[in-house]
Image (cartoon, rainbow, N blue to C red):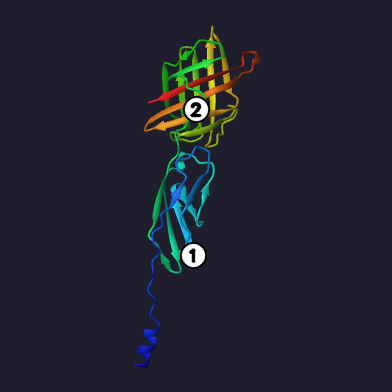
Amino acid sequence: LVLLVVFAGCKKKKCEQPEKPVPTSNSPVEYGSTITLSTTAVANATYSWVGPNGFKSSFQSPTIENANYSHEGDYSVTITVGECMSLPGTVKVSLKPLTTPCNPDKNTGKYASLPTTNYTSVSGGVNMVFNTYEATAATTMENMSIRFGTSGMPISGIYKIVNSAGTNIANNEVRITRTVTVMSMTSIFNASSGNLYVTKTGNSLSITFCDIEFVTTNTALNHSGSARIVID
């Protein structure tokens, strides 16, 4: 009888589950800005957030800097007080549509004072030499290569243009090379720097660059240009 009384006194206290949190965010956010997540403060609580790209945080109001489209999706948070955990509350985060500084017509380019270039052949796929995604656009006089750092189709976002010397490209980088032949003379132009804008909608890819300088060994031929390539 004594043992029964002792065991009864050790009975675990019933868990009082915290209320389900109602998280908020500053969605929709601009590309490259900061995502701010938040939930109501609860006394003596700990917080556990999970989200896209393996996101985890134990802060009440975590932030994500340099937002890109891979950060879009559902973010969930639970609150734990003592040994009692709430049900998860979820908030959806989205980014605003990407805007570009220029808007050339589909599959066209404008270089220096030359007439508009109309690309008649446009395609995209994995470059088997470098094992990275490459978009190509061509006319009878020009072949343009836009090579990314990833093997899969690039996601929407802004990519850094790097000079085409060398082979290694980071995931957020791109190299643009234009091979132009005029009257049997061939010149290779490399985009020197700047940004390239990508919008992916389903299986369609829109690629735009604006006022980018193209350089070659004969500096007298250096020029700037803009273009938009659409791979459907």
Left or right, 188 with reference to 11: right
Pick whichever of labels 1 and 2 is earlier in the sequence. Answer: 1
Q: Circle 2 — which element?
A: loop
Quadrant of the image containing the N terminus? bottom left
Residue 137: image location, x then y, percent: 46, 20
In this view, the residue farthest toward the bottom is 1
Q: Is residue 87 above or below residue 209?
A: below
Give the CA distance from mark 1 to mark 2: 46 Å
Depth order, front residue of 128/51: 51
Which residue is painted at 37% across and 92% down in the image? 2
Which residue is painted at 41% across and 54% down in the image? 22
Q: Is residue 217 above or below residue 170?
A: above
Residue 206: image location, x then y, percent: 43, 27
The residue tagged 1 is 43
The residue tagged 2 is 100
Residue 156 visible to the viewer: yes
* Type of amino acid at the residue the image marks with label 1: Ala
Which residue is painted at 41% across and 49% down in the image? 91
* Type of amino acid at the residue the image marks with label 2: Thr
- Mark 1 crowdedness (10 Å alpha carbons): few <14, some 14-19, many ≥20: few
Residue 128 visible to the viewer: no
Q: Is residue 36 above or below residue 159?
A: below
Depth order, front residue of 179/84: 84
Residue 89: image location, x then y, percent: 39, 55
| Total marks in image | 2
Residue 210: image location, x then y, percent: 53, 23
Depth order, front residue of 156/139: 156
Closer to viewer: mark 1 or mark 2: 1
Quadrant of the image containing the C terminus? top left
**Would you say the residues marked 1 and 2 are in contact, meaning their CB atoms lie under 8 Å apart?**
no
